[in-house]
Each structure stands twice: as C-alpha cells, then as structure tokens.
Image (cartoon, grey):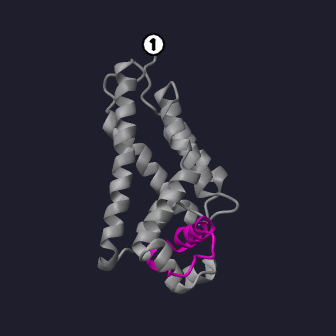
Amino acid sequence: MGRRRVFDTEKALDAALGVFWAKGFEGASYADLTAATGVARPGLYAAFGNKEEMFLKALDRYDQIFMGFFPAALREARSVDVARRALRGAAEVHTGACTPAGCLGINGALACSDDAESIRVRLADRRRGAEAVLAERFVRAKDDGDLRDDADPAALARFVMTLSQGMSVQAKAGATREQLLEVVELALAGWPSETR
C-alpha cells in the first residue's frame, strides 16, 4: 500500500506557481521548488509529474486565479473598452504587490533552450489562442459599426497582445503600475473607433 500524501497539493501548486513566475521555467530548479513547497522531490513527482507537467499545472492555476480580467474584457460593449480593460488588467497582474513582476507566460518563455522547446511552444500556442479570441471580438465590433471600415481586427488583436507582452517585460524590469497605465492610455489614444 502506498504512503498517503500529507501535504496540501493546492498550496504546493501555488508555491510552485510563485517560483515559476519569479524565475521562469528554466530558472526554477527542483531545489527552488522543494524549498518553496516544503515537499521533497519524490513527493512533487508523485503529485505533479515532471517539472514540465508541474509548470503546465501552475500555468492553469495562474489562469484560474489571475486572468479573470480577460474574459471580462471581452464582454465590454465598445472595442476600445475591451482593449482598455484587457491592458489595464494585465498591468495590474504584472505589478501585483504580493506576486512576482511580469507575466508567468512571458517570464516562463524567456531564455528557453532547446531542452525547454515544448514549453516555449505551449506558451506561444496559448498566446495565439488569446489573440484569436480577441480578434474575433474585434470582428464583431467592426460588424456592429464600432470600428472604422479600415480597421483590421487581427492587427488590433496583435497590437493589444504585443503591448501586453511588452508591459510584462517592462514590469519585470521595474516599471510601476502607474507607468504601465500611462502607456495604455497613450496607446489607445489612436484607437480606430467609428466616430458617428
């Protein structure tokens, strides 16, 4: 009969999430993960599988806890408010007082070697998925007359995602929330809303 797990897997996963968020996938060592979780390496393997599986579970947990602003942004009535809420939400997550700076998805993908190619691909796929959902929302906005005829929904989605990713890098480098929010407002000043 196997030994009974004596630790809270959700708390351990939250601790691992913090390590991955701060150090990225490759920067997070098993020593870091065992120290943060208080669980020995065999226990981590038993609960979460290998490091890659643990990272992907932490990424799902990150989405669950921190990314609620994105679906909420998609429900905004005007396209500029969709973009504003998505970017403001990202700025808040990137600069949380009790969390590492930046975005887990961006921090996790930086400096990926060939050994971590599968993680880089998975993260890129997630970003493309979010961009596609945003593009679909902007198509609806254009169909509803909320965007000018010359507006390109796919380019606008790419613009919002690129700005969000850049803000993550800036936050990791020390930019404050106020500085990022200033960038958001400057970026949205030229939003191609229909003016009728």
Q: Is residue 27 magenta?
A: yes
Please tell me whether the stretch drawn in magenta is mainly helix, strand or loop.
helix
Residue 114, horizontal then vertical, whole percent = 29, 78
In this rendering, the answer to whether 148 lies above or below 49 is above
Three-letter amino acid code of the residue under disc 1: Arg
Q: Is residue 175 magenta?
A: no
Horizontally, residue 20 falls left or right of residue 124, namely right
- Which residue in the structure is indicated by mark 1? 196
In the image, the segment drawn in magenta is: 1-29
Residue 129, horizontal then vertical, whole percent = 35, 47
Q: Residue at x 54, y 67 (%)?
A: 21
Q: Residue at x 46, y 79 (%)?
A: 45
Residue 111, horizontal then vertical, whole percent = 40, 74
Quick check: can you spot residue 168?
A: yes
Q: How many marks?
A: 1
As drawn, the residue found furthest toward the top would be 196
